[in-house]
Amino acid sequence: MKFSVQLSADYPDKNYGGDRVYADMLDQARLADRLGFDAVSLTEHHLINCLMMPAPLTFATRIAAETKQVRIMTSVVVLPLHDMRVYAGEVVVADILTEGRLMLGVGRGAFRYEMERLGVPMEETRERFDESLDVLQALLSREEVSWDGQWYKFGPLTIMPRPVRPVAMMMAVMNPEGIYHCTRRGFHIQTTPLSGNHQLLVDQVDAFNRAKADMGETGAGLTLSLSRVGHVAATEAERQRKTEAAHRYYGRFDNVYTGPGTVRHGMIGELPCATPVDELADSLLIGTPQQLIDKLAPYAELGIDRVIVNMNFGLDAQDTLETIQCFAEEVMPHFASPRMAAQ
């Protein structure tokens, strides 16, 4: 089982400065590369200070310039916010500048606040995403593409430059049946279980495996990634401190995900998290290295290919660097990937 560091830009204090936030993320990416993490990942969000990354492809190229082998995933970019005729070319440039280390994770968008302020009603995101994905795949694979759909109508055109290799694409999806059909279409899968819902995770993995089995050799290289919030804590007091920080983070996250979307001057209001802090502690990957190994073991047994760990939720930047170091040295060796074993 492999591991990725999610470089989510949490920005609870404007005085800290966006330049410092992104410098911290670059520090994390360089360290993850040096310590043998399989990938780092970036999440597209706009107009808010939680997961603040309006230009993931731009940031991906900067990471590639400062690292040697770590893969760079967008998990995810929000296709309905882009014109695919422009975006397809940007993807090709990013793939070229990352020298093939880009994995393009795509999704429909989850936060009503940002989607509707950017002109995409949530009720339209599924249809817009489906057509955008079809257009993007066509533009990346064919020349002189024309389209006559609900959201796109255009005559023959060819994006330039042409792709130098197929761009690996990953779909963010939770529903097991959706996982099955997206896998059958040739996508890598990123998912996450609901808090504490192990049966949902079992069903998600089963759907992925059924699809790969139905595909035979053509599906052999597809991967299933699981996204979780996590951090290493040396003591119980430290675990409690970091869990409370995650609890506050979820109060901000839920505000724009399922809540009222209370945002002022780009700053998300911190609402009480609906999940009790003790229940949240049980479901998150926060604990000593041995506690993390114990929590991760069922994922390895299920055959999860990659765990994407979000270590950025309002903690000090040095805390996160220390967690990346400790995780690599004391947790990852128990789930050694082929790349790590070869080192």
Image: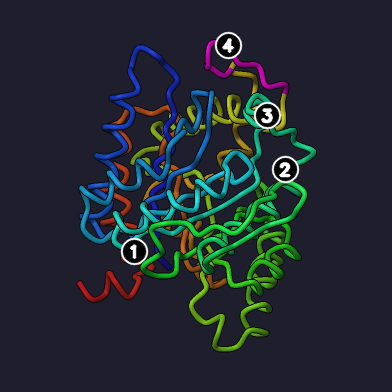
Q: Which mark is residue 325?
A: none
Q: Which residue is mark 2?
A: 125
* Residue 338 position within the rendered picture, expressed as x and y whole percent measured from the top left: 32, 75
- Of mark 3 and mark 4, the one earlier in the sequence is 3
Q: Which residue is mark 4?
A: 264
Quadrant that contains the N terminus? bottom left
Judged by depth in the image, the label closer to the viewer, 4 or 1, is 1
Judged by depth in the image, the label closer to the viewer, 2 or 3, is 3
Q: Is residue 314 above or below residue 143?
A: above
Tell which of 60 and 240 is nearer to you: 60
Q: Which mark is residue 119?
A: 3
Residue at disc 2, secondary structure: helix
Residue 298 visible in rendering: no
User: Magenta stretch containing residue 234, yes or no?
Assistant: no
Residue 130 visible in rendering: yes
* Residue 158 position within the rendered picture, expressed as x and y whole percent measured from the top left: 50, 59
- Of mark 4 and mark 1, the one earlier in the sequence is 1
Q: Amino acid at mark 2?
A: Thr
Label 4 crowd bin: few (<14), some (14–19), many (20+), radius 10 Å: few
Q: Amino acid at mark 4?
A: Arg
* Residue 271 position within the rendered picture, expressed as x and y whole percent measured from the top left: 64, 19
- Of mark 4 and mark 2, the one earlier in the sequence is 2
Question: Residue drawn 55% across and 39% down?
Answer: 281
Q: CA distance from mark 4 to mark 2?
A: 24 Å
Does the CB distance between marks 2 and 1 fall below 8 Å? no
